[in-house]
Amino acid sequence: MTKRKSICLNVYEAVRHRGEWITAKEIAAYTEDVVSVRTARKQAAHLADYGVFKVEKRPKGYRYRMNDAMPPDAASLVACIEARKAVFELSSGQHHIH
């Protein structure tokens, strides 16, 4: 992960990469603390509001995962995020992101 990436992209990649329910604390850890827990929680909630993520309330907080049945607007947002990811990969010389 690079610090130059947008917060949205960092959070999106963490949730997509995990492939299962993930907490804001785990998102922050995945980004190597480039994104704080508080910011991860806020950004994940926004992406859940748009339908990109599913959200599940648990006694100790919220968990997020990719929404398999996202609405068309959410799919368009994901396409924009993926395009941004490609730009960061090209500008940093990376061919793939771990």
Image (spheres, grey):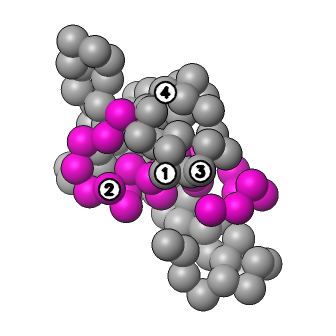
Amino acid type of the residue that numbered disc 1 sits on in the rendered structure: Tyr
Q: Is residue 17 magenta?
A: yes
Residue at label 2? 18
Could you give the CA–CA distance between mark 2 and mark 4, rounded to whole angstroms?
Answer: 16 Å
Residue at label 3? 32
Task: Residue 89 in the image: state x and y as whole percent.
Answer: 67, 77
Residue at label 4? 41
2 vs 1, front mark: 1
Q: Please tell me how crowded label 2 is: few (under 14), some (14-19), or many (20+) other residues with Cα within 10 Å.
A: some
Mark 3 residue element: loop
Left or right of 81, for residue 56: left
Nearest the camera: 86 or 93? 93
Q: Please tell me how crowded label 3 is: few (under 14), some (14-19), or many (20+) other residues with Cα within 10 Å.
A: few
Amino acid type of the residue that numbered disc 2 sits on in the rendered structure: Arg
Left or right of 54, for residue 84: right
Amino acid type of the residue that numbered disc 4 sits on in the rendered structure: Arg
Report the span colored magenta: 1-23
Kindly indicate whether the residue at mark 3 contacts the one at mark 1 (C-beta within 8 angstroms). Answer: yes
Kindly indicate whether the residue at mark 1 contacts the one at mark 2 (C-beta within 8 angstroms). Answer: yes
Q: Please tell me how crowded label 4 is: few (under 14), some (14-19), or many (20+) other residues with Cα within 10 Å.
A: many
Residue 14 is at least partly visible in this image: yes
Residue at label 1? 30
Task: Residue 34 in the image: state x and y as whole percent.
Answer: 67, 45
Q: Earlier in the sequence, mark 4 or mark 3?
A: 3
Left or right of 39, for residue 17: left
Q: Earlier in the sequence, mark 2 or mark 4?
A: 2
> Which quadrant would residue 39 be assigned to in this image?
top right
Nearest the camera: 36 or 87? 36
